[in-house]
Amino acid sequence: MLDAVIVGAGPNGLTAAVELARRGFSVAVFEAKDTVGGGARTQELTLPGFRHDPCSAAHPLGINSPAFRAMPLDRYGLEWLQPPLPMAHPFPDGTAAVLSRSVAETAASFGPRDAGAYRRLVEPFLPKWDALLRDFMALPLSSLPRDPVTLARFGLVGLPPSTWLMRRFRDERARALFSGLVAHVIAPLDGIVTGGVGLVFALAAHARGWPVARGGSQSISDALTAYLKDLGGSVHTDYEVKRLDDLPPARAYVFDTSPTALARIAGLGSAYAGYRYGAGVFKIDYALDGPVPWTAEEARSAGTVQVGADSKEIGAALHAASREGRAPDAPFLITVQPSVVDPSRAPAGKHVFWAYGHVPNGWEGDLTDAIERQLERFAPGFRDRVLARATAGPPELAAHNANYVGGDIACGAASGLQLLLRPKISLSPYTTRHPAVFLCSSATPPGPGVHGMSGHNAAKAVWKTLRRQP
């Protein structure tokens, strides 16, 4: 009998498997798709030689992850590549605000009226970033904070809505960039804890950047898999699990799935009936004949580019998709251009690029024209560079990754109390009413992102349970 079986080979499932194998437990992973990776995969979606990331591409939380940093993933081929700028936010007048590794450079891009306010916001936390991140992403209520004073100070700033935090800024440049940071978790700007979301992304960039993985996000998953196999674990792909009886006998079953799928497979009925899924996204992967012709010079060297004219436009786009049930007329876009720093992703002189905008959960329309109108506002002539495109709305994203229910790439609405208390109010969010069944996906704390911390935290709950057994 195995000690643990993991269902789903996404970053959280693989991390949970590694953490258990490192502690001497026998582990096997079962994945329905023909490759490992979940939200961290790389595929030729458009033309031969163009390597795209169908889901995540830039990894500020990955390079900062306490779980990943404790593993020798570099020995298994993972190499982080840092673009000249982590992120840029261009404006219609051809200028841009930037999120740089340098606090001073970032502050200066906001203009003199907000430079000091930004420095006062982030500088107190940077010297204690690693301890703060561990406390922020740790197993809830399982241990005392390493730095309770800094965590409390962060809570005072981060728990209120981002709209409160942005009152510190007098001009639109800082407000727009910070609004875009919050939008990475598809949360309306006036929700609780959204100030903390934006602040975490900013601090992550200043601490270690917003890198891409050389060769694509698949490198993260492949490194985790290779490390797991060296530890004695096994991985089985093309293995769809419809019920617990489809799996070999084990002392624990750990699911890197949505709560809905776990309840169905494990026979837990309505255990997660109250769990909410949020807005979806419409994503386009492009093969380009040259770099994106951004008007703002800073955007040309940034790994990630946020596209939204101002905080009002960004807020309206999020509100339309999350609360009004319609696709926004002017979608806020998150875009990533990996080949700015990784030429292996496309043939010589060519580029890969992706963009997504927010749409209602389960939306079946086509946002291509609206997305490309937005891109043309900030990069005139963009359409002329397009060699091929691969589009994916909520139905296609859900087919690619079953955890993206209705196109929700966060595996559950990251808004309101559900941003903090996932998948339900519980002192032990990784356990279920079945004593041998656990949940480790991004539907559990600390939530969405390629960082493996949900898997790391769930593994702690699993090995504590296993050690108590005779």
Image (spheres, helix red, strand yellow):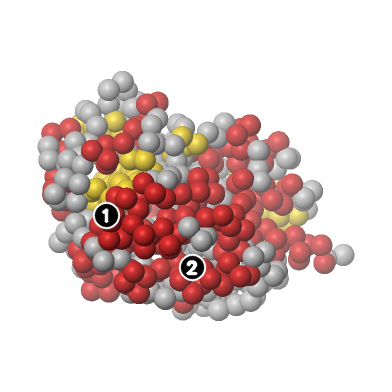
| Residue 52 visible (yes or no) | no
Q: Say which element carries label 1.
A: loop
Q: Quadrant of the C terminus?
A: bottom right
Q: Nearer the viewer, residue 303 or 296?
A: 296
Height in image: 399 above or below 352? below
The disc placed on residue 111 is 1
Image quarter of residue 342: top left
| Residue 457 visible (yes or no) | yes
Tell me whether the residue at label 2 lies in contact with that at label 1, contact meaning CB atoms closer than 8 angstroms. no
Q: Amino acid at mark 1?
A: Gly
Q: Residues within 10 Å of mark 2 (few under 14, many from 20)?
A: some
In this rendering, position of residue 219 left or right of residue 339: right
Q: Residue at x 38, y 74 (%)?
A: 161
Upstream in the sequence, badge 2 or badge 1? 1
Q: Residue at x 31, y 20 (%)?
A: 348
Q: Say which element carries label 2.
A: helix
